Every structure is written in C-alpha cells, then in structure tokens.
Image: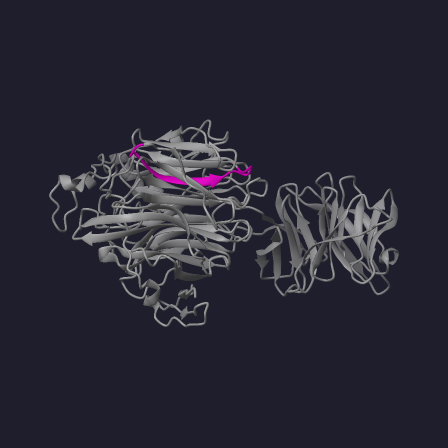
Amino acid sequence: MKKIALRFTQAIHSGKNLRMLILATLAGTMVFTMTSAFSQAASEKGHSDRSERPELRFADPDAVNLEAGEIPAQFLIPQSVPDPAAVEALKTSNLRFWLDRQPKALKDVQVSASLSPANDHSESQLAADPNNPLHMVGGSKFFTEPANYIFRDGSYTTFDGGKTWLQQVVPGYEKWTITSDPVVTIDDQGNAYYAVLAANKTVNGCRTTYQGSGMFVSTSRDGGITWDDPATVHLTTGSGLGDDKQWIAADSQPKSPYRGNVYIVWDLFVEESGVAFSRSTDRGKAFEPYKFLGGFDDAFLGPQVDIAPNGDIYVVWDNFSNNSIEWVKSTDGGVTFTKPAHAVSMVPMPGVLSNGTWRNVTLATFAISPTTGTLVLAWADARNGDTDIYFARSADGGQTWTSGALLAGGRVNDDPIKDGIDQFQPALAVSRTGEVGIAWYDRRLSKNTTIDVSQAISTDDGNTFQPNTRVTSASFDGNVNPAYPKSGSCSLTFIGDYFGMAAGAEGFYPFWADTRTGVQEIFSVNSTGVAQTEELVYTNNLPVRDLAFDAKGVLHFSEIIASAQQSLGRINQLTSVATAPAKALRQNVDPNQIGGSWAGNFAFDANGTLFISNGAQPGVIYSLANDTLSSFFTIPTSPINGLQLRDSQLYFTSTPNSIFTLSLPLDPSQPTASLVYSNPIHGSISDLALSANEIYFIDSSEETGSIYKLVDSQETKFFTRLKGAIRGLTIGPDGRLWFASENKIFRVNLAITKPANK
C-alpha cells in the first residue's frame, strides 16, 4: 500500500486564514493528522561541514573557538567601503524608479502552509510543464524542527497557473533521516521527476556528522499528485557525506533524438571526487552507472544540466580553485562528454552578508533557450565590494561567452555600482518563446536589512535586459524564525542556498522563501502580470466577422451588410495599419452563390487564392481564383467555420468542436480530411490561427471571449477578455495574434514583451 499525505492550499487568503484539506491515501485510508506526513525526522547535511575534505566556502570550524550565539569571524568576509556617490544616488532616483516599476496589480501567492513555527519551508525550486504551462511542480525543504535542522523534501503542484497548490512530503525515504536539495523537472508527457539527496546523520551540539548518503529520483506519472517509489542513482556507504547538490533535467525538446531521457548531475565524493552524471532512458524507471564529467578536486560545487533544442546536453558548475564557471557538452545523449572548458570568471560572495546570520553559497544558475539554443548563465559576484548579479550568454554552443546584461560588464541589478547593497541567489528561466528571466534576493529598499525579490527580463535572447522590477509586495527579514544548519556554529542560520523560477503560462514565476508571516514560507507570483495585453488596432462601423493576412502581409477582414431585401458580405483590406488604418473593398461575397449563407470566414493561400467557408450545413469550402468561384470541399453533415493555411495544409473547424486539416493540392478522387483535435467540452470551435508549432482557437459558445492554445494535443487557455466575444483570429507577419471582437480589431503578443508594471 502506497500512502500519501497531501495538503491543498487555497491561494486566495482572507487575512492569514488558509483553507486546507487533508486528502486520503491511495488505499482509501484517511490521513487525519498533518504531522503524519512529517513523521520521519530528517536533518540536512549543511554544505559547510564535510569531514572528508577541506571546506572551500567556509573556513574549518575547528580552527576557531565557537561560542554559543557567536558568528565565526571567517564567515564575515569584509566588504569594501561603499562609494559615497553611489550611496547618495541610491537615496534618490534609482530607488524611487525601482519601486515605481513594481507591478502594482500583482499579489504574492503563499504556496506553502505551515501548521506552526516549527514548519519552516525554504530552499525552493520550480519547473513548468513544457506542453501545459498552467501545470507546474516545485519543491522545498519541509521543516519540523528548524532549531535542529530537521526536515524532508516536499513537493508543490499546480494545474491552474499557480492559483492553487497541492503540497506533500515526497514519500519513499523512511529509512533515511534526511532528504535534501530539492530540484524538479517535467518531461514532454507531463511526468515530474524529483531529484533527492538522502542521508543518515546525527547532531551533537553544534556539529553534524553523516553515516552514508544516496542520490535518488522520485517520479510522478500524474504530474505531481502521487509519487512512485524512488529509483536509486547512487549509494555511498560508510561515514561521511558522499553525495551532494544535485540537478535534474528531462529532454522534452521536440526535435531531439533523445527526447524522453532524464539526466541527473551532482557532486560526488568517494575514492575520487568529481561532478557525476547519470541518465535514464526509460523515463526515470532506472538510471545508468555514473560517470565523472570533471572537477576532479575538492574545489567544485553545484552542477546544473539543461538540454538544447537539438538534444545536446550541457552541464555547468562552479570551480573555486580558480574562481570560474566551467562547462561540458554531450552530443550523443550522454554517452560521451567534452573536456571541461572555461565559461566565465567570478568573485565568490561572502559566506554571511552584513546584518544577516544566514549562510550564502555562490551557485551558478543555468538554462538554454528552447527557440535559439543560446546558453544563459547567472551568478552572484562580489567583484564590486558588495554582491551583484552577473549574467553571460553563449550563442555558439559555449565556445564564446559574452555579457548580455542591463549594465556594462554583465551586471544585471541596476542600483548604483559599489553602493554597498547586496543582491544574491539568482534564479534563471527561459520561456518557450525565448524570453530570459532572472530573479534574485535584493536588499536595496532597506539598505541591507530586509529582503525583496527583484527581476529583470530580456526579450532579445539575453543581449539586453529591461530595467529591474520589484516582485515582492512586502519586504521580509531573513533572520526571522530561521533554521540552524549546525555545521560547526550554533549561530549560523539558513534561508536556503537557492530559490527557483519557472516560465509558466502567462509569464515568469519566481518561487522563493519568505518570512513575512513569521515563519519561512514559500511564495510565488506571476511576476510579469498578464503578459497578453490587448492593443486596439482599428474600429469598424460594422461587426467584424473574421481576419486574415494575404501573402503580401496585408490584413483583411470581413463584414456583413444586412437589409430587409438581402445580405451582402464584404472582405476589406486594411491599409496603413501602423499610422492611420483605412479600409478598402477587396471582394464582395454574395451568400446566394455559396449556398445561401455566409458567416464571414475566409483565408488566403501563398498564391493569393481566396478560400471561403459557408458556415452552414452542409459545410462547404469554396475557392476563388481569377474571379472564378468553385466548390472545393464538402462535409454533408456538419458546417465548416474557421479557415487557416500553413504550408500545404488547409485547417478548418467543424462538428462543432473539432479541428481538421486537408492536404493541398486536394486529390479530387480522395478528398478526405484528417482530424487534428477534438474536445467535447467546447460548444463551438468557430475559428483558429496557426503559428509554426501551435494552434490557437476560439469557442464562440462562451459568454466571455477566450483564446485557447494547442501544442501536441495539450490544450491551455491563452487569453481571455471579459467584455465581448471573440470572432476572427489570425497570426500576423509581426508575430502577434490578431482577433476581432464586436466591431473592433485587436492584437496581443504571443510572447512576454515587458513586465506589467504600469
């Protein structure tokens, strides 16, 4: 019997009240106490204590006399004196502009739900489903005794774009006393994979010792609702901690020959040390023996892995022996890798920042654009005396790296340089349409006292970034109700070594630890607001029925002039769209010539041929070329509505909730349409638009106008307007989605173009 203990958090709060529902086990046994999900006490290793090797980020705790309540001096790395002019600039324009750029309409969502101050949640990460970005799965540490660093890894799942979340402890690790370093990925089938570090440890005063460890992957075949028994990747026996700081990625690239593979990397300390790699070729059921990729000394930390659009695998990690970030590449699905190569140099950040007690670790964050294959990299850097966020990109597969950032030299945070303000723990994500988002902890508002989350977005493949925006609606104090790693000091605290960010349905979703409630909780928000903001292009004097661009990129729209005697359809072309739009008649459509009725649907092919559907039963598509109108295709039992062409395929809607395609040129002897998609929940799929890889459609039976997106038979809601139904739909040469509502023509962006900060 596989038990699960789940909590569901309604992310619409009234004050501090949360609606929580404890669900049942798969076997039907109700779990009535929330603490049963945390019954196994767990405690985490702490990156600053490994008895088998020298500590590189923090000095050896044995070298100093640790007193209770004392922060060791070696943790407090001195910072340079802030530049007075920079501090003065911070007091004036920069801070004001940063606050003004905060998305005013956004509301942070509390994702986790703690029963008591003992239930801190921190060190978080988030992944979005590549085919259904409303579906996201995240992870964090679920504490039961923060004072003794007792916790387990837990997961969070949403299917509605972050409005509501399901949380649970990841099961299957009862024989271990800790599970740690949460990281999640989702594959092209919606399976979620959770990489878990498990270990046995004991705490004696302010010191922790370990008795073996292991690297595992838990898989959820239902998108994060239940978790299978973990698959073993590697086991380390004996004393000490042999496994650490893992990362995982699933190959969901449509053009990859290795699509469906799952890759995991981690720090491994056995007879020899190095960055370890393993893969699964059966979607997480089993993992192959590990191989070392590089870092063959004690000076490496925190590998991350991602996959390029062609299936190439890239792994990056920090090398503290020369203060650099290195990378390797595999072009054969992980069978072989290149030798480690230098990407960028860095200056590691202090182990503890001023006015704080929590530990800090310099960890690179890494991603690859699914549209261009550009590699993007961000890290915290202390080269200016305080800690800043730096960024680099490679457009040639890692051969050369350049600084694409807001400011010169790759610096992303736009407060005055050398102002003494710290920005740290960057999180990086790239959307499906290629926008790059970076979020980080930022202390500029309080001059290094409280913490906010800031972000910057690039819409040009990481070449430049827009001005920083404040994500959080309230600042928080990282010293509130902390956890204590007990890694040689009783005073060093913990808010996580990293936090997460995903590119979801409507923008970027930072996923961070926050203490505003008095407990460490996980918060998130769609930090770019509603990315698709409609823009009015033209107002007609009659209702607009449909839209289409011809082969020359000229917009056309249809209207129907009705009188007591007859109805007449017209297709107009719209000129001077960018300046002063004006319509001119292109074609009259007499309903009597197409079966007696016309709903207004039409489309053009690349040769200028006009296709018209009658919108009645029987459904008929007509072609008009050289002033000759011909019946082109017929469905006797159903009307044909929306029309769109892509390459040599004519798509249309019918039946009333299905999308079909015809191959052109049509074979008169076998005029057969192929079903592309059908969903009975829709009352009337009345029109559609086509991008290179996606289908957009509307359901005219809905009271509000909604546009849906279809990718590989996975449907998500893309855009909704509350006033007025949507009729026509098309994608223009500008890459935007154009639609009609009543007598107006609008367009929206298919991609995120700027934060919603107005």
* Protein image colouring: one colour
Q: How far across and down, in percent of the image, does residue 465 sit?
A: 45, 38
Q: Quadrant of residue 118?
A: bottom left
Does the stretch in magenta take in 122? no
- In front of the other: 124 or 341: 341
- In front of the other: 678 or 149: 149
- In front of the other: 206 or 242: 242
Does the stretch in magenta take in 306? yes
501 lies left or right of 346: right
The residue positioned 68% from the left and 65% from the top of the image is 683
758 lies left or right of 494: right
Q: How far across and down, in percent of the image, does residue 79 sit?
A: 22, 36
The residue positioned 31% from the left and 39% from the top of the image is 270
The answer to whether residue 469 is above or below residue 329 is: below
What residue range appears in magenta? 297-311
Q: How far across and down, in percent of the image, does residue 8 sit?
A: 42, 65
Answer yes or no: is residue 461 visible.
Answer: yes
The answer to whether residue 145 is above or below residue 408 is: below
The answer to whether residue 48 is above or below residue 709 is: above
Q: Quadrant of residue 378?
A: top left
The residue positioned 62% from the left and 43% from the top of the image is 735
47 lies left or right of 540: left
244 lies left or right of 185: left
